[in-house]
Amino acid sequence: MTTRTPRGIRNHNPGNIRRTSDPWQGLAVPQTDREFFTFKTAIYGIRALARVLINYQDEHKLRTIRQIICRWAPANENDTAAYVASVEKATGFEADRPLDMHKFAHLEPVVKAIIRHENGQQPYTDAEITKALVLAGVEPETPSLQKTRTVKGGQTATAATAGLGMVEAVQQTIDPARDALTGIAPYLDAAKWALLAVTLIGIGVMLWARIDDRRKGLR
């Protein structure tokens, strides 16, 4: 026995938007369902669902799951309370929390939850949902450039290169000093240790200057 595909999935109208005179983008020709719209592809059907939710907010000031679902699925036709609870659970948003349907992070989970409740399944990929929401005028939030993997990799490489440069500067400064101290060490007596200390301090200052110049990109 095969399971029949839900009506909303068959019609590419997973929100089960009822037929009206609204000239939706992507409507199929002809319209084969007398009650519900049929779209050319699911992308257009999901887009229409998203546009309805956006319109609820912009035109009717409906911003919470409870407000949205009470209009989407009125109690005279549906178990609205169960619908609200279903969307609340699926999205993780409290039923009376104000949402912004112009924000991808709010709109996407609500769209997915409505599709699942209407059809008993949510068969669409994240890519399909995203494409539909972009067509509806809502794009995913772009991550900060400083947080992208490419930039992080570049910062790491730059830091490593700078580190190598500092090591080279240290090496270039220490090697001559070491050789000089090795040469004079046998001839030092106790009275000259103070002079050696002053010399080492001078080397330290010179070394820091070299490192600082490298850090600033100076040659």
Image (tube, rainbow, N blue to C red):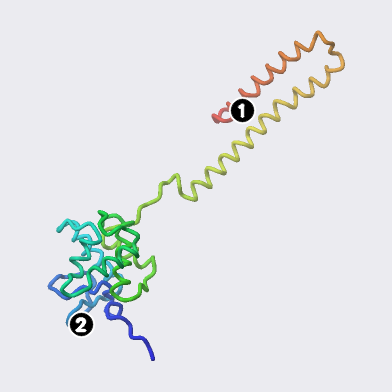
* Nearest to viewer (mark 2 / mark 1): 2
Displayed quadrant of residue 63: bottom left
Check residue 33 in the rendering and tell me which mark sits there, or answer none: 2
Where 198 sits versus 65, above or below? above
Q: Residue 175 carries which label?
A: none
* Quadrant hosting residue 22: bottom left
Indicate the quadrant containing the N terminus: top left, top right, bottom left or bottom right.
bottom left
Q: Which of marks 2 and 1 is nearer the N terminus?
A: 2
Q: In this view, does 143 lie to the left or right of 67?
A: right
Looking at the rendered structure, the kind of residue marked 1 is Ile
Q: How many residues crowd around disc 1 within 10 Å: few (fewer than 14), some, or many (20 or more)?
A: many
Instruction: Please give the count of numbered marks on the rendered protein.
Output: 2
Return the residue found at the far left: 21
Residue 119 x/y as whole percent: 30, 76
Answer yes or no: do the residues labelled 2 and 1 have beta carbons within 8 Å? no
Residue 21 placement: quadrant: bottom left
Residue count near mark 2 (Cα–Cα under 10 Å), binned few <14, some 14–19, many ≥20: few
Residue 3 sits above or below residue 138 on the image: below
Q: The residue tagged with tag 2: helix, strand or loop?
A: loop
Q: Which amino acid does label 2 sit on?
A: Asp
Location of residue 202 in the rendering, given as x and y in whole percent from the top left corner? 68, 16
Q: Can you name the residue that lies furthest to the top here? A: 191
Q: Answer with left or right where residue 48 lies relative to residue 152.
A: left
Please report the residue visible at 26 percent of the width from the left and 66 percent of the height from the top: 84
* Depth order, front residue of 64/106: 64
Residue for badge 1: 211
Q: Farthest residue in the bottom direction?
A: 1
As drawn, the residue found furthest toward the right would be: 186
- State the quadrant of the C terminus: top right
